Structure formats: structure tokens, C-alpha cells
Image (spheres, rainbow, N blue to C red):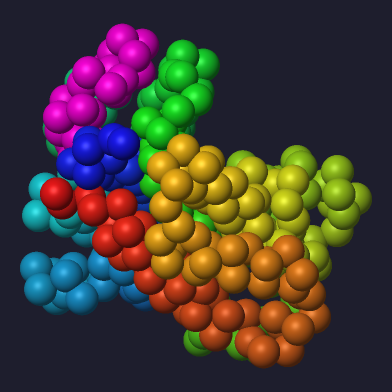
Amino acid sequence: MLLGRTANGLYWMFRYIERAENIARLVDAGLRVSLTRFDSGDDDWDGVLQSAGARQAYAEVHSTATSADAVDYLLRDRHNPSSVMSCIEAGRNNARMVRTALTRETWEATNECWIDLKAHLARRPKAADLPELIDVIKHRCGLIRGAFHGSMLRNDIYNFSRIGTFIERADNTSRILDVKYYVLLPAVSQVGSSLDNMQWESILRSVSAHRSYGWVYDGEHRPANIADFLILNGRMPRSLAYSYSKITSNLHYLEREYGLRPQAIDTAETINAMLTRGSIVDIMDHGLHEFLEEFISRNNQLGREISEGYRFYQ
């Protein structure tokens, strides 16, 4: 059985790498949504910070949520433990701790990501440079994932790493969907308008789902269809349903390998069943924002149960 500290290092290495990419995607979502607002202002970024779970911490160092300060805080502020730079450093530190459990290709991709992004994020980025910078972050994180997926043995090391990836990804997709609601709260009258549809399209682009959505729904940007695609479509690799199918299968691999069934497996199966059998009509009737808040809470609970069940700190 893998040592708890090693399992912890692998799990959190990949959570941090995924989070770095996801924060970049969240910034991208904020940029894209704000560009569709005729009255766009700095208030838009308050919603992005809320969705990143960073609003309270941000308020301790900034009195107002300006675009420049919010972007800087989310991308490179060392005092923000969830900034892209903080996550890349934390991911690399965890990778170094479990260096012998990783292939050379995975370690080198992680180290090169850290070196490259440290250079790119050494200074506050200009607004005009943000799209290219976000692409660099996504590219570098993708290289780590590709090196890992293409070179690692499919054993418990692989399973803990993948569980960390998909718990973080599920959290992110739910938060990016919620950005739409935070940003639109002052403009509820626009729901269903062409502007509303443009913002939904921006959400799809921020999770690299615009083209694949078009294949499934012929390109019509209806809110219920987009929510269905990102929540319940088991073929979409950033959907909640896809993430939980992978979390559940990797936990089952660990169950067979270790002969243990911690509470986390029951929790994952319950959430997976809810997403597999769920209906977007029921979700929208319940309230999409309320559904997403509840999902984020249950996803966090699963993370705690995995840590306890596999004794990460022993």
C-alpha cells in the first residue's frame, strides 16, 4: 500500500496543476463575459473573485475589485494560495517530494512549467497580453498532463493522481458555470436575450467546449443545453458527470488493490449516480445556482473523506 504521505503528495500535485489551469480559465471567463457587457466595469470582477473562492481574502488587501488588481491577484499574487503562480509552485514542491514515484518525463514537464511561468509572471501582465498568457498557462499544464498520461504505470500512483485532477476539475467547472450567475445578477432582465446567449457562448469557450457543444447541439446557445452539456454529459471531459465517472472508477481500482472501502467510495458513488440519472429540467427547476453551490460543498466533502480514508498525513 502506498504511503499516505506519498499518496497525499501525488493527489495534491495534480490538484494544484489542475487548479492553476482552472484559475487561468476562470480569468478567461471573466474577460470574455465582461467583453459582452455594454456597461462592463470593475464590478464584473467581484463575481469572478467570488467564483474563485477568493473574494474575502482579496478584500483584505484591496478595497475595491478593479480589473487589473483582480487579474494580478488571481494570476501571480504570492499571498493568494490559489493564484496560478502559487499553485504551480505548490504543484512542483509536491512533485519534488514524490519525485521517485514520477516518470522523468512527468517531472521535467512540471519543472519546465514552473520555470516558464515564473518568467511570464515575474511582472504584472498588460491587459493586451492576457489572452496569450492564459494560453501559455493552459499549454504548460496540458504538457504535464500529457507526459503523465503517456508514461505512467496504471497503478495506485496513477489513481491518486487522477482522483486529484478530477476533483479539482469538477470544482472548477461548477465555479465557471456560477460565474455566469454572479456576473449577471445586476442584469436579470437580460436573461434570454442575445447578450445572454453571447455570455453563455463565452462560458463554453473558457472550458474549451465551444466546438464540441456545437457537434451535440448544432450550435444553438440555449442556457439549459449548455448547463446540461457541462453538468450531465458524460462524454464531455470537463463536465461534472465525466469527472465523477473517473473519480469513481479510480476509487474502485484502489478498492480492489487495497481491499479497503472507505466512506469516500460511497460518497463518490452517490454523487456519480445523481449526475448519471439526473435531469437538467430538475436541476433548472431546483435552481442552477443552488445546485452548483450544493455540488461544490459535496465535492469538498469527498476531498476530506479521501484524505481521511487513505491516511494522507500518516
Badge count = 0
Give the x, y percent position of residue 110: 29, 23
Give the x, y percent position of residue 282: 76, 83
Give the x, y percent position of residue 4: 22, 44
Q: Is residue 94 magenta?
A: yes
Q: Can you see residue 109? A: no
Give the x, y percent position of residue 57: 16, 70
Type of secondary structure dominating the magenta stretch: helix
Q: Is residue 284 magenta?
A: no
Q: Reply above or below: 209 against 279.
A: above
Q: Residue at x 51, y 73 (%)?
A: 295
Q: Is residue 203 left or right of residue 264?
A: right
Q: Residue at x 59, y 64 (%)?
A: 269
Q: Quadrant of residue 84?
A: top left
Choose between 39 and 252: the one closer to the eye.
Answer: 252
Magenta part of the chain: 88-112
Q: Reply above or below: 263 against 306.
A: below
Q: Is residue 52 left or right of residue 191?
A: left
Q: Reply above or below: 45 against 184.
A: above
Residue most extreme to the right? 218
Choose between 191 and 257: the one closer to the eye.
Answer: 257
Q: Can you see residue 2? A: yes
Image quadrant holding the N terminus, namely top left
Choose between 101 and 174: the one closer to the eye.
Answer: 101
Q: Reply above or below: 159 against 79.
A: above
Q: Residue at x 42, y 52 (%)?
A: 260
Choose between 8 and 51: the one closer to the eye.
Answer: 8
